Image (cartoon, rainbow, N blue to C red):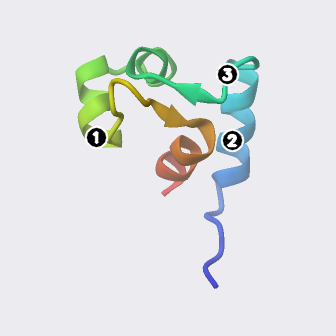
């Protein structure tokens, strides 16, 4: 059984406070949060245009 990363809970809490009404984020949302270009976010985090990425999945990626 794998353990969660050390910063996962902190990252999840920050994302929830930054996006209080959202559970699924799109590249433009992630770009605003990270300060990166939306194209970079799509490529690096694997964000699909029609599906987006969940806050939980993004927190896992950001904490690793």
Residue 52: x %, y % from top left:
44, 30
Q: Residues within 10 Å of mark 3 (few under 14, many from 20)?
A: few
Q: Is residue 48 above or below residue 5?
A: above
In the rendered structure, which disc, 2 or 3, sits on the residue that comes first in sequence? 2
**Rounded to the nearest whole Å, what is the CA distance between mark 2 and mark 3?**
12 Å
Q: Nearer the viewer, mark 1 or mark 3?
A: 3
Tell me if 39 is positioned left or right of 20 in this view.
left
**Residue 50, image quadrant:** top left
- Labels 2 & 3 near each other (Cβ < 8 A): no
Residue 9: x %, y % from top left:
73, 50
Residue at x 23%, y 22% (from the top left corner):
39
Mark 3 secondary-structure assignment: loop
Residue pointed to by mark 1 = 44
Quadrant where the N terminus sits is bottom right
In the rendered structure, which disc, 1 or 3, sits on the residue that comes first in sequence? 3
Residue at x 47%, y 50% (from the top left corner):
61
Mark 2 secondary-structure assignment: helix
**Residue 7, image quadrant:** bottom right
**Rounded to the nearest whole Å, what is the CA distance between mark 2 and mark 1?**
19 Å
- Labels 2 & 1 near each other (Cβ < 8 A): no
**Residue 47, image quadrant:** top left
Residue pointed to by mark 2 = 12
Extreme front residue here? 50
In the rendered structure, which disc, 2 or 1, sits on the residue that comes first in sequence? 2
Mark 1 secondary-structure assignment: helix
For residue 22, which numbered disc appears in the image?
3
- Labels 1 & 3 near each other (Cβ < 8 A): no
Q: Residues within 10 Å of mark 1 (few under 14, many from 20)?
A: few
For residue 57, which numbered disc appears in the image?
none
Extreme bottom residue here? 1
């Amino acid at each position: 059984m794998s353990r969660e990363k050390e910063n996962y809970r902190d990252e999840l809490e920050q994302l929830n406070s930054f996006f209080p009404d959202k559970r699924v984020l799109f590249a433009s949302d992630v770009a605003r949060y990270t300060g990166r270009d939306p194209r970079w976010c799509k490529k690096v985090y694997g964000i699909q245009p029609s599906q987006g990425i969940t806050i939980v999945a993004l927190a896992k990626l950001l904490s690793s």
